[in-house]
Image (cartoon, rainbow, N blue to C red):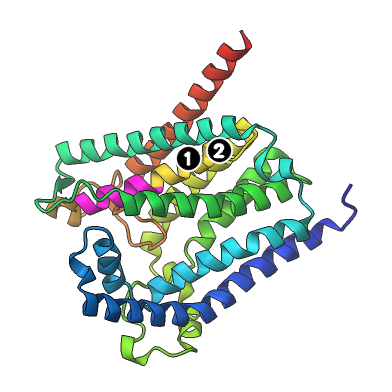
Amino acid sequence: MNSRPRHSDALIIIGYIVAVLLGAALLAPLLFDFGQLFLAISTTHGWRDSKLIGWIVEAAEKTRLPGYFNRAALIVALAGLWPLFRLLQMTRAEIIGIETPAHEIKNALLGLAVATGAIGVLVALFSLLEVCRISSSARWWSIGLPLVSGLCVACIEEFLFRGAMLGMLRRSLRPRLAILVTTCLFAVLHFLKPPARGLIADEAVNWTSGFHVLTQLFNGFGNWQNVLAEFLLLFAVGWVLAGARVATGGLGLSIGLHAGLVAAMKYFSQVTTPSAAFRRAEFFPWVTENHCKAIVGSYVGLAPIAAVVIAGALALWICRVRVRRQDS
């Protein structure tokens, strides 16, 4: 039984977040230099036209220092998860639940399918209503990067938010209150994102440049007319994922839902182009333009929120039906 004061758990979580941000500031310039070296080598060897790694070269060309900061934060966060769990003295059941790996994999695949389908239906409706149109240069086969990105982000964030944070809060709070606090933290922390471009010229990047990016993290809160719609979507996502974790007793379903939402939003943003009517905000508040770098899709508003909530409810209903059939 853990006899450590409960407030020390919160201090450990805060310390972990600070360490991730400082670690990202130090690591980002190194990753940037590595990316520039990779681009130089790829130009020399003609890798740009390679079917195998050409997409990596293309992604590296588009990535500026803030993008490397985001990747550095994911790397440091992943490396720090195990020490975090050890410091919090959390059990396996508190972090990932007591379900078998096979059961969790089934839940993850279910969540992935339902979330992807829900966003697909939403984008189809958007296309019919002329919120967006299919891009003439859409690369339908480019599903690999969005899927890998979704899975990586989902695993890291689910272990952190629905594993460590929610597990810690459930030690002393009622489930609904623990879900509320975790969801608010999830939404707020996602606004700590640097702008995509314009901070530092590539040729001016040095080992201290990551700390300059660090000072820009709160820029996401500056434009209050955009904060509400984006915050509500992040809150809906966090609430659905936390609810899935508590309802199923494991992280599998929340990981699948999270990965599906990220992958589908990222993928459909690649193959669609917002319409002029959308740009003029004619569909507000049902759907409006996204300005939050933490949300990979182009669209926020009541319709995307409804899609997220419906996806979560449908996935949980399927899980309950499956459990009833197994018990009968």
The reply, left or right, for residue 115 in relation to residue 175 is: left
Q: Residue beneath label 1, please? A: 256
Give the left or right position of residue 214, taking residue 167 as reference: left
Count of numbered labels shown in the rendering? 2
Q: Is residue 270 magenta?
A: yes
Labelled pair 2, 1 in contact (Cβ < 8 Å): yes
In the image, taking residue 269 as reference, residue 65 lies left or right, namely right
Q: Residue sitting at 37 percent across and 37 percent down?
A: 307
What percent of the width, then of the height, locates residue 233?
A: 42, 48
Q: Is residue 259 magenta?
A: no
Residue 13 or 149: which is nearer the viewer? 149
In terms of image quadrants, where is residue 48? Answer: bottom left
Q: Residue 300, can we see it?
A: no
Disc 2 from disc 1: Cα separation:
6 Å
Magenta residues, start to end: 262-271
Residue 27 visible within the image = yes
Provide the residue designation for mark 2.
252
Which amino acid type corresponds to the residue marked 2 in the rendered image? Gly
